[in-house]
Image (cartoon, coloured by chain):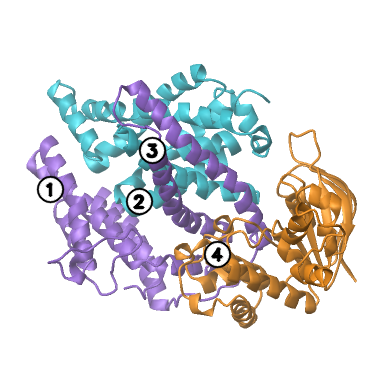
Amino acid sequence: MSIRLLALIPVAAAISLALSAAVDAVALPLFLDTTGTILATALAGPAVGIATGVVTSAVNTLRNPTFWPFVVVQVIVALYAWGAARAGLFRSFRTAVPVGLALGVIAAVTSTPISYLVFGCTTTGGIALTTALGKALGLPPLGACFFGSFVSDFGDKAVTFALVTSVLHALPRRTAARFPWALRAIGVA
Amino acid sequence: MKSLTLEHASFWYPATEAPALRDVSLEVAQGEIVALVGALGAGASTLLLVAADLAPRVTGGRLTGAVARRDRSGIVLPTPWTQASGMAFTVWDEVAFGPANLGWPAHEIARQVDRALEQLELVPLASRDPATLSGGELQRVIIAAILAMDPGLLLFDEPATELDAAGAQMVWRLMRRLAGEGKAILLATSALDAVPDVADRVVWLEDGAVRAVGAPDLLADVAVCEAGLGTSVATVWRASGLPGPYPPTVAHAVRRWR
Amino acid sequence: MTRLHPFTLLTIAGALPALAWVLPAPAGAAATAAVALVLTLTPGASPGLTGIGSSPGWRPGLVVLRAALLTAAPFWVFLLLLHDVPTTIAIGLRITTMVASFVWLVAALEPARLVEAMVAAGWSASVAYLFAATLTAVPMLKARAQRIAEAQRCRGLSPRGGIASRLRALRALALPLVLSALHEVDERALALETRGLRPGIRRTTLAPPHDPVVERAARWVLLLACPAALVWRLL
């Protein structure tokens, strides 16, 4: 791994962790905690993306210990983003947003067993309350837990993909050309 | 003895058609300070990266011509917060970061670090967390960190940007001391008033090419002043309508006036 | 506790939650939770990386315990909302073990010692860099995000309005932050390269943490105890 890609990983991980300030400023129920992972993958490939996801989870765990079991989700997000980058799906919002919505489903499917088995679906207050709503609607426990994770992940991943698309298109060509996957991700190379 | 030699060097950044450096030939001898001056985008920073063997190796791009380095180089970039290692939680450890990466024995690292901290008047800050320092303090730490690696060729890209007047003066005095010890120094700076007291030679860059080379009084040259790169004294002298040649410094102006 | 080798601290913080999940509930989880909570009271467990604060009325030694209890408490509330009492107790004790273990770890672990321990153990300097550099980059980017938000608020950014306008506002906040951070990647790479950080280097350890044989043996015992407990549980 080149020194530039090594330098990218902590920056991308820190982006994921710092975007909470932006989210708070606009009062939207989003996490954007996979932004750095998806961005790093789109710029530099799956190894860098996975490393970013693992580092993000490790550092996030220092703030909230319940994040660590979900490191698997970060790895799957990186692999999914790699597929999207290979197919040039960051070329416009029209391709990126549906792909992000699909990732929301996959992320919810991946995180539900972890949330259910490890935390009894209480990972966050929002997920717990949405799970309670699902139970009240007559869903079985695992289904209610999936409902809680889905509501949280669906929009979040779509917005994340849209944001990464914006970033990739806003990068000067000279800067983008220095990252091995950046131009391919937006369908140029 | 030449520490750095560039012969007809041209450089293109990735995905750009226009070269950032065009046919640049330059030599820097041991014990010499050469100042690069030019407008924004003239290519001074790029030339430093090429001299440091970071372009194209780290930046990517394409280099033609020949670059020969006799000594190990160390480069100080303008923005201190991106140069901090991120792995050090005290100033002492930050300065020791480079020598530790070189695999030097611990006692040698301690000697070089203590010496560098003294040179940059950082001993009182040795146990501080770099994240708590001001921009100027951190820039001095970065300079110390490069010096601690004992490079023979020192490359400075706007080293005084974050420093106050006293800090900048300290750095200029340090450069002269280091040149006296045999270091070769290539300095890109927009602190034009300091150049006559610091540099032995001045290279004027324009659009990536060498426009002129000369002694520091080049910064009082008519063409240089017209390009906005003259010293304050030369610029004021010219603006006052006084006859040339323009004096580059106050001392020169006083001598002319008398 | 801060004088324990960093790998020992990590092993304890990792083994306790693992044992909490493997050992039969509620007794096993209660035991591990008790151990984890007692650890938060040990000398040397002090406000650490995440700036766990203190408040009047709490003795300094109880600050870490308070942080652990406050972090774990909401989980108990949500568990009661979703599950019956026995399930709440079982999962609640496991989560409490995990939370208390990690809160204690954050308070007891010094990042500088961990970096030195990784280098002394022969880990790649790049791996040590990834963890440490992220820790130092996060507060810097957070502060920058705050400044961008304040600047945009001066220009009329408001959290009011529909989803579409808030998403546009989010883009106005996030894009400058991300682009400026990416621009810095190049400079960081140049700085690291010039200071000799390259893949495969053998870095000198400046202050390797003392690692007695007893601690190394204890780490192995703890590590082996987890799969052993799992095997015992399955049989």
Work out whether disc 4 and disc 1 sit on a shared chain: no
Q: Which residue is mark 2?
A: A61
Identified at 59% across, 36% down, the residue is: A43
The answer for how far apart the CA atoms under marks 4 and 3 are is 28 Å
Q: Amino acid at mark 3?
A: Cys
**According to the image, label 4 marks what residue?**
B136
Host chain of mark 1: C
Q: Colour of chain C?
A: purple
In front here: A130 or B11?
Answer: B11
The kind of residue on which mark 1 rests is: Ile
> Marks 4 and 1: CB-CB under 8 Å?
no
Q: Which residue is mark 1?
A: C89
Helix, strand, or loop for circle 4? helix
- Please name whichever residue, A103 or C26, is drawn nearer the observer in this view of the structure: A103
Q: Residues within 10 Å of mark 4 (few under 14, many from 20)?
A: some
Residue under numbered circle 3: C154
Where is residue A149 shown, x and y percent of the image? 29, 30
